[in-house]
Amino acid sequence: MSADEFDPFVERLFNQAPVMADAGLFAQRVEARLQSGSRVRTVALTLAGLVGGVVAVRETMSVNLNLSANEGPVAGRALEQGMQSASGGVQSLFQAGIDQMGLGNFTLAGMGGIELFWVTTALLVAVAAAGVMKLSEEI
């Protein structure tokens, strides 16, 4: 069979796919798996985003930008004062929200490098174990 005959032959085979006896059941099982994975994925991503956002805001609040220069122009000093007042308001707002959630005393700065390494390792092992459990349920 030449290449010119093969392409139309394959196209005809795929255009006339046979209907399986359990096609409806198969479609329902695929849809159920897609929906269950979607819920788990949505919850996991939302939880990770919230935790990451809280940690990012908490660590950002402790950043000290030294923008003050005694010999700077007047506009620069006015900009600095405006940024300090705005950042103070935002910081107090986020601190109040974090304290309300009960995460006011949660800091990563108090941990040494090795403690952070082991905490990260434990979290990665837990995520891997959860992935293996989920995979074993689907197989």
Image (cartoon, grey):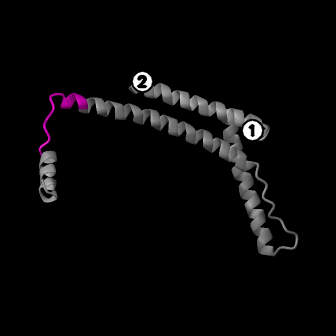
Q: Is residue 139 visible?
A: yes
Q: Tell me where residue 18 sits by quadrant.
A: top left
Q: Position of residue 90 (x, y in %)?
A: 69, 51
Tag 1 residue: 107
Residue drawn at x 76%, y 36% as measured from the top left: 114
- The stretch of residues the image draws in magenta is 16-26
Q: Extreme front residue here?
A: 1
Report the magenta stretch's main SS.
loop
Q: Residues within 10 Å of mark 1 (few under 14, many from 20)?
A: few
Side of 51 where 111 appears, left or right:
right
Residue drawn at x 11%, y 56% as measured from the top left: 5
Residue drawn at x 72%, y 52% as measured from the top left: 89
Q: Tell me where residue 51 sits by quadrant.
A: top right
Q: Is residue 105 visible?
A: no
Tag 2 residue: 137
**Amino acid residing under circle 2:** Glu
**Amino acid residing under circle 1:** Thr
Q: Nearer the viewer, residue 7 or 134?
A: 7
**Is mark 2 in CB contact (under 8 Å) with mark 1?**
no
